[in-house]
Image: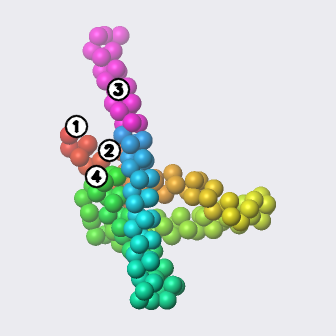
Amino acid sequence: MKYTDVRQARFQWFGSKQRTRTHWIEFLRFILCGALNTAVAFVIYVFLLWLFPYGIAYTISYAAGIFISYWLNTKFVFEEQLRLNRALQYPLVYLFQYLLGLVLLFLFVETGHLSKLVSPLLIVVLTLPITFLLSRYLIRRSFGLSERERTDR
């Protein structure tokens, strides 16, 4: 092997290691933004309880939470540009998460005989990586580098 081949291979390995680190950082930011989004949606819900019945307050705060999530994930987690067409598609991530959670809940409670109280917590843990990947793909249209990282190369 020539020196340049060894050097190039080393830089490819480093780039791969850097990309993995970037993905973990994105995942941590995703969790933090999710916690912030949950808190904001809850505050919206509590405020709306003064104006509406709880069902309407919940529905409005849940919908607001989806779009707040899109904004936080686009700007801070994946560092991409906001796009109207992707914002309108973003609720599909949560529809998928909901349906998957419903199936898992049924399986855990009915088949696995797990607690109805513990199962939703387990579902959150299990669906978090899937929600992250779906959000990432929908916002970025790839599982790879961000717009900024692609232009810096």
Mark 1 neighbour density, 10 Å: few (under 14) some (14–19) many (20 or more) = few
Q: Which mark is residue 12?
A: none
Asked whether disc 2 touches disc 1, contact meaning CB atoms under 8 Å apart, the reply is yes
Residue 88, percent across and down? 35, 72
The secondary structure type at the circle numbered 1 is: loop
Q: Residue 137, can we see it?
A: no
Give the amino acid type for the residue marked by disc 1 in the picture.
Arg
Residue drawn at (34%, 52%), measured in percent from left and top?
Answer: 77
Q: Marks 3 and 4: in contact by CB < 8 Å?
A: no
In magenta, the rendered stretch is 1-21
Q: CA distance from mark 4 to mark 1?
A: 16 Å
**Disc 2: which residue:** 145
Instruction: State the separation of the CA atoms marked 3 and 2.
Output: 15 Å
In terms of sequence position, does the residue under pointer 3 or pointer 1 come before the other?
3
Could you tell which of marks 2 and 4 lies nearer the N-terminus? 4
Residue 67, position in %: x, y?
36, 70
Report the front residue among 70 and 62.
Answer: 62
Q: Quadrant of the N terminus?
A: top left
Q: Picture quarter containing residue 80? A: bottom left
Q: Position of residue 65 (x, y in %)?
A: 41, 70
- Reading the image, the residue beneath label 3 is 14
Find residue 17 and report its image quarter.
Answer: top left
- Residue 92 shown left or right of residue 139 in the figure: right
Marked residue nearer the N-terminal end (2 or 1): 2
Residue 153 - label: 1
To which residue does mark 4 refer? 79
Which mark lies nearer to you, 4 or 3? 4
